[in-house]
Structure formats: structure tokens, C-alpha cells
Amino acid sequence: CSLQHMDLRTQVAAKQRVLEDNLRHIGKVQPELMMPAIHGPDWGYRHRARLTVRNVLKKGTVLVGFHEKRSSYVADMTACEVLPKRMSRLLPLLRELVGSLSIHDRLPQIEIALTDGNDVLVLRNLESLTPEDEQRIRHFADAQGVSIWLQPAGPDTAHPFHPPGAETLSYTLPEFDVRVSFKPTDFTQVNHSINRVLVRRALGLLDPRPGERIADLFCGLGNFTLPIARSGAQVTGIEGAMGLISRAEENAKNNDLSRNTRFLVMDLFRIDTAQWRALGPFDKLLIDPPRDGAMELVKLIGADGPKRIVYVSCNPATLARDAEVLVAVHGYTLKAAGIVNMFPHTAHVESIAWFEKE
């Protein structure tokens, strides 16, 4: 959180300037309209976090928290104001819990995933727990009202530990009558309230209509796919991870949207012309890539590309780079762009852009 010295308005203005400068200097483009910034609560907003655990012999204690800036050291912290208070208060208690375990030096990470009805902590245990360890963790879970998962290896090995029969994690998009279920190790937006507004704005710009063929690229669990499908459009969601696609299909089924959705596993960083053409023509695209952007993909769109593209970005530099290709090479107009303050007090800039082919 490198921007806590700024008030929220100044943070938003600074991030908007970052987006404008990147579009102008890297992309050599300028939107016809700069949209009003999307922003919301500035504290207690972070519903996902990955905490590092470090047994520090010199201090005779276990640290649980985030790395110091540009350092492998873990900050000695007892609270985090961007986490909900109910989770922030657990930080010192987690230090005590890990310190009491036989594997206190073999538990390098705790992942947090919070919803309105269920708070999950995923303990990355590199060694098996002893019966005494298991009893301590069960007592902690019961006392603090959280669910504990264990992850002995990669993300796919994460599994519920205690309590038995805990509720499935999910978040809702009430405006579209959609509920999205997920595992605590799946990627979801950290800021649930801002995500709802982001989905609303993205669909407002995309303007999906019944019968249109729309692709949601880097679709994840279906955060945009399912609301688009609710409009009656035929939506193809594409993602590189099989596990996410499986859960996206389950979410479509649970929301009664299987009839107008299909999901495909495809590496969009290595997609070629033949693969892109085989997907068939689309009326519109929604692109929501990771920080590396979607350069290989936007190169393929071509002169006969869709009439409208909505691009959600977590890196204004790669958005600007890809915007230059869409505008200068493929003939799109950058109709509008704006920032989404998904991560208050941090320097991360989430943004959204609307491209139109006249």
C-alpha cells in the first residue's frame, strides 16, 4: 500500500493520469471520452490475500503478513487496514497458531478467501500435520468462525480440512441474477463491491443483444460470461486453465445458462490464425487478460474483426500497447476509457476501454 499518504480523490486522479499518459505515449491514442472513475470503499475491501509465513529465529517469533517493499523480508505486522476487520484482527492470532505447530518452519503461506457467508484460510503445509497440530487447527477454526483448507502441493491439491461440510465459496452479481462459485485458490477479483460495478460498466459498453455471438476471452470462472449470457447472447468463454473452465461450466449450469454458453480451454498467448478463424466470426469481444496483455490475440483480429471490443485491463502499459494495434493496424476507434480503483492505497491501476469499428 504505497499510496496511503494520499487522500482517495488524489489517488484516483493520479491513476487516471497514469492511464492517460500510457495511452498517449505508448499507444499513441487518445479516447474520445474519459469515463468517470469507478471507486468505492477505501478500507476493508480486500477479500483475497496471500500472506507469507516466516519463522524468524533471530526474533524468536513467527511473522505472518506481506513482504516489505522490494524485499524478501516479511513485515512485522499485527493488522492490515485494507483487509476486512474480522480478518485483520486474526493476524496476531495466526502468528500464535503457526508458532504452536510442529511444522511452523514448513508452512510458508496462508491464502485468504472471504465471502459474505464463509471465510476460508488455506494453509500451505509442506509436511503432514501431527494429531496435535490438527487439534490446534480445529480449535482455532471453531473459535474464530473460519474454515481451514490444507494445500500440501500445487493449487489443485487444496482441500477442506475443518469444519466438515463447510459452505461452498461464492459471490453474487445481483443485477444479473448470477452466483459464481469458486475454490479459495481460484482467481477472483479481490474487491467484490467494485467488481459488481465493473461488470455493470463492461456490459453497458458491450451492450449484448439476444442472438449476438460474443466471445469472453480470458474468461476465468465466468465473471463476465454469465452476465453477458443473461442478455440472451450466445457466449463463448475461453481460458487457458482447465480447472477454471470446469468451474465456469458448473456455474453456467447452476445459473441455468448452459444453453447459450460454451467454454473452451485454449492458450490465448499462443493462439494462431487457424485457431482463431476456427472459432467463427464474433459480433463483439470482451477481453480481460492478465498483466501481460493480449498482443498475440489482438494481432489476429484483422480487418473483418468484431464491431465492438471492451477491454478490461490490470496494466495500463499493455492496454496502451494493444490499443495501438487495434487503432493503427485494425482501424478501430477508441471511443472511451477510464480507471477502476479496484485496489485503493496501492499503485495498481485497473482500467476499461471501449473500441468500435465504424
Image (cartoon, rainbow, N blue to C red):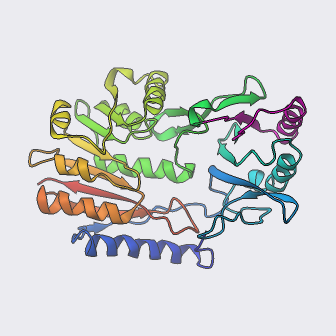
Above-or-below relation of 159 to 108: above
Say how many tags the image has. Answer: 0
Q: Position of residue 208 (x, y in %)?
A: 28, 40
- Whether residue 157 is in magenta: the answer is no
Whether residue 358 appears in this view of the structure is: yes
Would you identify the image quadrant in which residue 329 lies?
Answer: bottom left
Asked if residue 250 lies left or right of residue 129, the reply is left
In magenta, the rendered stretch is 124-153
Residue at 54% over, 61% down? 343
Would you identify the image quadrant in which residue 282 lies?
Answer: top left
Residue at 46% over, 61% down? 38
Quadrant position of the N terminus in the picture? bottom right
Q: Position of residue 209 (x, y in %)?
A: 26, 36
Whether residue 333 appears in this view of the structure is: no
Above-or-below relation of 137 to 324: above
Q: Position of residue 221 (x, y in %)?
A: 46, 35
Out of 65 and 316, give the one closest to the viewer.
65
- Whether residue 140 is in magenta: the answer is yes
Quadrant position of the C terminus in the picture? bottom left
Residue at 27% over, 71% down? 26
Q: Position of residue 50 (x, y in %)?
A: 64, 51
Asked if residue 61 lies left or right of residue 286, the reply is right
Above-or-below relation of 192 to 74: above
